Amino acid sequence: MTTIMRRNQSSLKTILKDQFFNTILKPYKNPKVINQKPFSTNSSKFPEYEMPTVTWGVIQGRKEKLVSRVIISDYLKTIGIIPDELEELELPSAVEIMRERVEFLQKIGLTIDDMNEYPLMLGCSVRKNIIPVLSYLEKIGIQRSKLGEFVKNYPQCLHASVVVELVPVIKFLRGLDVEKQDIGYVLMKYPELLGFKLEGTMSTSVAYLVSIGVNPRDVGPMVTQYPYFLGMRVGTMIKPLVDYLVSLGLPKKILARMLEKRAYLLGYDLEETVKPNVNCLLSFGLRKDSLPCVIAQFPQILGLPLKAKLSSQQYFFNLKLKIDPDGFAQVIEKMPQIVSLHQHVIMKPVEFLLGRGFSTADVAKMIVKCPQLVALQVGLMKNSYYFFKSDMDRPMSELLDFPDYFTYSLESRIKPRYQRLQSKGIRCSLAWFLNCSDQRFEERLYGDYIEPESSGPSFCMGGKLVLPGNEIVSEEEDDSDDDEMLYRRTVSL
């Protein structure tokens, strides 16, 4: 009896077990992809950012994953994408999902070649990665038409978390006083900023620049102009350049002002560009103690292809203007911008002076004394010359002695001061009443004696230089020896 009952129980278990597996755990036949309704973060604002109609598909076993991977790889090969780098990457279960990713990336402006440059972008979910990142980038100021270009330049951004990685970088830039409307411009220039850690290179580079005298309020405009310095290491790039320029005699305070206005100087390579250019200046006859003044006036000289430019200009000055190499070195010390001045621009003032009766030798002497002559507008020179001849009625030799006369504004300085002299009945040299500030001129005008003439700084005769196209307006002289004042007198930023 007991044996019969055991047999009945065993057969009952077998029946129940078979029935369970046949109904509950029946294997899938022709598995279908799970559909999901289209979704958008804001369909009215981002109409083309429609969420995909499919997601990752069904949960697959190992065999099904291998089959899906082969199918997706074959699809990618048919459209020209090499899937080799995707071997270690988890891919979606259905080829439709991959096709939708490719089409979405093409829709924002990427090509198959762009995807081949960085195929890992195909591992990003349209819904979870791409759309949130693109929406945030557009929100902070990158134009929708340029999103494709941005992703092409920095595709790694598609892997980033908006909240954890992107938002803190933008807050950091705003904390540096980068204007809100400039954020998009900065990121388009240097998209790699989004991948930097806040406590790393960006913070240390800013801290070092502030420590050498850069005004913290000017860091924002510096970033807008040249954001690449945020990615430079202080110890290997920024500090060695600063130390070298200081070793040439350039005060840190002046160097800080230079960097505030021309942050791109930090991008000049010290060993390959800056040092060779400094050695080149010395080889062309410039005095070592003149280098700080030369660099302060024209910082770009550190990054130019200097040897070729100096060789060309020296040959031109010797051939056309009869200025020997020593005279050319003096010209560069006083006005280093000449290395980048076009030769046809230089010849216009020279031809004007030759046409007024000056000999070639006289013109050469005048240019060595005052190199700013070669950058003046001929129309302004004519007006000043006619006033000199008709109203002042002075000999030409005075212009030869003081060619700086042409660099002063006729209406704001020459005429008013000359009329004051006439009313007082004072007869003096051109330099005595022109090469001084308004305050000093008043002191001279009401003084009981004629003050001896003293030569002003050779590098700012006539005031700050403005290249052709703008009127040259002189700047008041300041007797202070403070570095800030020296810089204001030597270079206009």
Image (cartoon, rainbow, N blue to C red):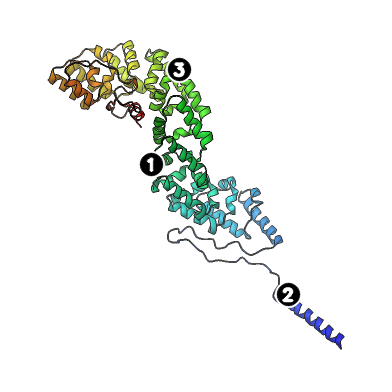
Which comes before the other along the chain, label 3 or label 1? 1
Badge 2 element: helix
Q: How many marks?
A: 3
Residue 361 lies left or right of residue 153; in this view the side is left
Task: Please tell me which residue lies in front, 49 or 273.
Answer: 273
Residue drawn 53% across the image and 49% down it = 157
For the C terminus, the quadrant is top left
Which mark identifies residue 284? Answer: 3
Q: Which residue is mark 2?
A: 21
Vertical placement of 177 versus 22: above or below?
above
Q: Tell us which disc is closer to us: 3 or 1.
A: 1
Q: Are marks 2 and 3 in contact (CB under 8 Å)?
A: no
Q: Are marks 3 and 1 in contact (CB under 8 Å)?
A: no
Distance from the alpha carbon under mark 2 to that under mark 3: 94 Å
Q: Tell us which disc is closer to us: 2 or 1.
A: 1
Residue drawn 25% across the image and 22% down it = 436
Give the crowd class for mark 1: few <14, some 14-19, many >=20 residues within 10 Å: few
